[in-house]
Amino acid sequence: MLQGWVIVGTSFAYLGLLFAIAYYADKRADAGRSVIASPYVYSLSLAVYATAWTFYGSVGRAASDGVGFLPIYIGPTLMIALWWIVMRKILRISKQNRITSLADFIASRYGKSALLGGVVTVIAVIGILPYISLQLKAVSNSFTIVLQYPWIIMPAKVDAQPIMQDTALWVALILAAFTIAFGTRHLDAAEHHEGMVAAIAFESLVKLLAFLAVGVFVTFGIYNGFGDLFDRAAADPKLAPMMTPLEGVAGGYASWVWLTILSMMAIMFLPRQFQVMVIENVDEKHINKAIWLFPLYMLAINIFVLPIAFGGLLHFPEGNVDADTFVLTLPMVEKQELLALLVFIGGLSAATGMVIVETIALSTMVCNDLVMPVLLRLRRLRLNERSDLTGLLLAIRRGAIVGILLLGYLYFRLAGEAYALVSIGLISFAAVAQFAPAVLGGIFWKGGTRRGALAGLSAGFAVWLYTLLLPALARSGWLPISFVEQGPFGIELLKPLELLGLAGLDQITHAMIWSMLANIGAYVTVSLSSAQSADEHRQASLFVDVFTQTGEAGGARFWRGTASVPDLYQLLARFQGVAAADSAFQDYARGRGLRWPGDTLIADADFVHYVEVQLAGAIGAASARIMVASAVKEEALTLEEVRKILDEASQVVMYSHRLEQKSRELEAATAELRAANERLKELDRLKDDFLSTVTHELRTPLTSIRAFSEILNQEPDVDLAQRRKFLGIITKETERLTRIINQVLDLAKIEAGRAEWSEAPVDMRETISDTVIAMSQVFQEKNVRVEARLPEKVTAVRADVDRIIQVMLNLLSNAVKFCDPRDGQIEITLAEDERELRVDVRDNGPGISAADQQKIFDKFVQAGDTLTDKPQGSGLGLYISRHIVEYHGGRLWVQSRPGEGACFSFTLPLTRAAGGLAHAA
Amino acid sequence: MSKKVLIVDDEANIVAALEFLLRKSGYEVTAAQNGDEALQRVESFAPDLVLLDVMMPRISGYEVCRRMRERADWNHIKIVMLSAKGREAEVSKGVSLGADLYVTKPFSTSELVGKIGELLAGA
Amino acid sequence: MIALCMLGCVLFNFPILALFNVPATVFGVPVLYAYIFLAWALLIALMAWVIERRR
């Protein structure tokens, strides 16, 4: 079944499927309903990290190194834990500045330097070449192997193959064609390739499933589960050491550590990772899911690596089968044709995913950051004449894709045999790791300068070249091997694998140590000793402070100059096409409530910045800067001015903080006001209650008076007795009315503080006796016995005698009202101690319940059961009495138990606070 | 058959005046001094019209009116509310509870008797 | 989250790893392998939990 045409046919079918998915996704994106707006798709797209290297190479490495392959996946997991800080910042910066690639990011940060962008691009391309060649190797090898079914034959050495029959070349060309179809059908303003992302997510699933299928097959199909597999491995003397795997890890401790660090940086700075993680990201929130989904993916795809490795070793003990191929050869040897085909497709999937994304990312960099700046500078006049450059841009990118893949193939032929897959990949890792200081420093340290970044990158790259790339070439025979073994020109200290005598490390670790040292060292020292241009200063600020600044206006502030709208329109149209330019202008106009075309747009700083950012989406920040600068007359800002603007900005921030504070205080004050208002309303309500009660109290007697008066007036036959009775009622009610009016007026005066108080020495003995005498007639009428116990002499108090009499009258009349109807007794006591005089009025009435004792001092409340005996009072008496007593500085209270009468007492202090009667409100 | 009127007010004097007036006009009159008593009297006396004071202890006149209107068999009884409060809010409250008339104190006796006559004539 | 990264660094480094480097097996799986994968899974789970809580 596994004939050549089947394999080729399936491969093309699969690639066709990928293409169809991409096409569909692009169509949906154009219609506005994106398929990739899901965090799950985003997370899966990140799995493009796992390439044919993971698919085939991990097993290969595990077979010799035990768990030594794992740091490549654990490292990223650890790095991802830091993503919350690092990644979000990079994302935010990239969105704000319309970053189109890794090179763009670095160039933009260091003052939109075209030179830096170019350097980064060159490093990236050269660094990734080994990686691409590794994919080609994997695909062509696996193809060859599966073709030989049912024989297991390892592919012949590469250089033995004539070029035209070299599968790898064909693979490279086909992949180039596909990549062009995927990524360069049109220019997108933000460099989004929705179709590509959808296809990548799909192929991540495919390769995971394929690998898991093989894993399950080997573990449970060929052997009887994990236990069985490991037991047999332990039993085999060659394999037993692998059971205590740490000894097997090449390079020991240092290697493990550096491999982890290396992978941590690779996950961020591989161009394809940057592309899918940052540039293709559509929603910042997707990171949340990705942070744990992506490590989970990596965990899953690695579970079966060790079992497959052991299975392979056990199955092919003679060692003539390359461990890198176990994933494929094990199903083959067990005659599982379908599974083998699936595995092949899985490997193909992994390789194509990597190649497509990586080359698209690289081609974007080459176009925007390498070729265009050069073209624009060199032949500026000619380019300015051309009205539509979109065709040119696309052509450059396509050319770059083909070029990169061919270079990859070249590397494969030249140096591909020297190492196993994993080692080749690690060389690329080390190359992209050189970007780490420039990027991480760039987003956290404002002091990083362009020169520093250049120095660091160059130094690191140079070391990389020397310690990794050249030895690889030497091993393949393109350079004299003596170069490696004895050092250039025989200088031992400069041996590429043991620089300055640092021996005993594996090659990668060694290279990493030296290159990082050189890179970071150069970056820091040169940054500290060089000055920043105005541009750099501004960019540094924009990047490092991205979370504290608001919006894109940040960039616009730093611009001064004059521009014309038509010029800018031409500019945009030239690079993005008329349609895109129109839509961009329309968006801008709409945001300002205008219409385009039609209303006039003002070419102010905001507008120019907007156009520049749009343009950057097509050709990169550096080129956009150049183009916009040529289209407008710009006045350069000096560093001083930039500093001033930054200062202003920080002032503004300070002011806005103060404003926030003020507004919070305002809120607090408003809340207080509201509370005060509520209190006032409450008082108002009380006043309303009071008024309505008073109204009622006044109108009630009036009703009787009027009614009876009218009766007497209108009814002819009222007999004498009745007439007397009615007139009596009228009189009584009139008196009642008068009393109430007086009391209310009194109360009003007291409460308004307008009562007139006189003050004179008062002899309480006399006052009390006088009052008793005044009421003697009432006492007689009601048959009440009054007893007054007064001491011989009391100290005089300063008081208003009339008011005191009023209090006494009130208490006595209450007592009379409530004391026992048949045998009323009232007892008055006067006592003196050092501080005050005290008067008690005791009656033998029914007493007052505890609840009523509180209420009787309220306005208009009267004690007693109104059913049986409605007292002829107003209810204000006690209230006013208390007021009077408290005004004098005393207290008025009652003690009573139901059934045992009541005793009202009040005190008058002997001394006063200095300055007249104490006013107790 | 003379119509029956129930006077409900806690002020004895007012009750006296109203009793005199209404008896002079030929009605059969009885009185109650609070809400509970009033409801009992309605039950036993079966008046045709009730003069209801609003400001009473424990159960206010409004409450009595509402309870009266809850009973379908009492729906024919006319209710005249008397109150010292004359604000619009109170008047409409009284009417919305089902009173037929709302009179503020102090009132004109002749007017009141006249209105009572109208209400009872229409029954 | 930084703490998790630190934790991971500690867990996956040699001193701790060496602890588990014994020729014993757990359910037939060598201890070290089991440890690495389990620790890894645990780390991922913690990361997921922290993220969910942050939101």
Image: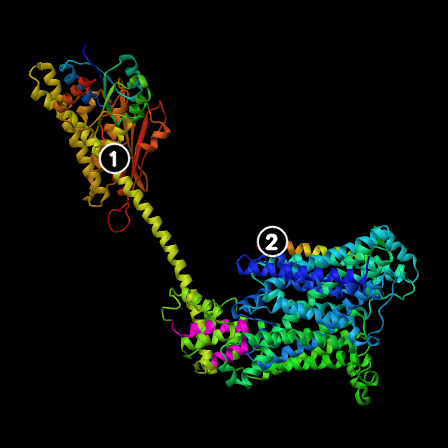
Q: Quadrant of residue A318?
A: bottom right
Tell me, yes or no, whether dots 2 and 1 are on the same chain.
no
Please state which of residues A875 and B98 is positioned toward the viewer in this rendering. Answer: B98
Q: Is residue A419 among the parts visible in the rendering?
A: yes
Q: How many marks?
A: 2
Q: Is residue A25 above or below residue A190?
A: above
Q: Nearer the viewer, residue A595 or A462?
A: A595
The residue range painted magenta reads A601-629
Q: Nearer the viewer, residue A213 or B28?
A: A213
x, y (%) of residue B43? Answer: 30, 14
Q: Is residue A640 left or right of residue A235?
A: left
Picture residue at 21% right of the left edge, 30% below the top: B84
What's the colour scheme?
rainbow
A619 inside magenta stretch:
yes
Q: CA distance from mark 2 to mark 1?
A: 57 Å
Residue ranking furthest to the top = B1
Q: Which residue is mark 2?
A: C52
The residue at the far bottom in this view is A489
Relative horizontal placement of residue A272, taking residue B11 as reference (left or right) = right
* Amino acid type, mark 2: Glu
The mark found on residue A101 in the picture is none
Circle 2 sits in a helix, a strand or a loop, which is it? helix
Residue A680 sits inside the magenta stretch: no
What main secondary structure does the magenta stretch of the protein show? helix
The circle drawn on residue B89 is: 1
Q: Position of residue B62 (x, y in %)?
A: 29, 27
Provide residue A157's location: percent of width, then percent of height.
84, 73
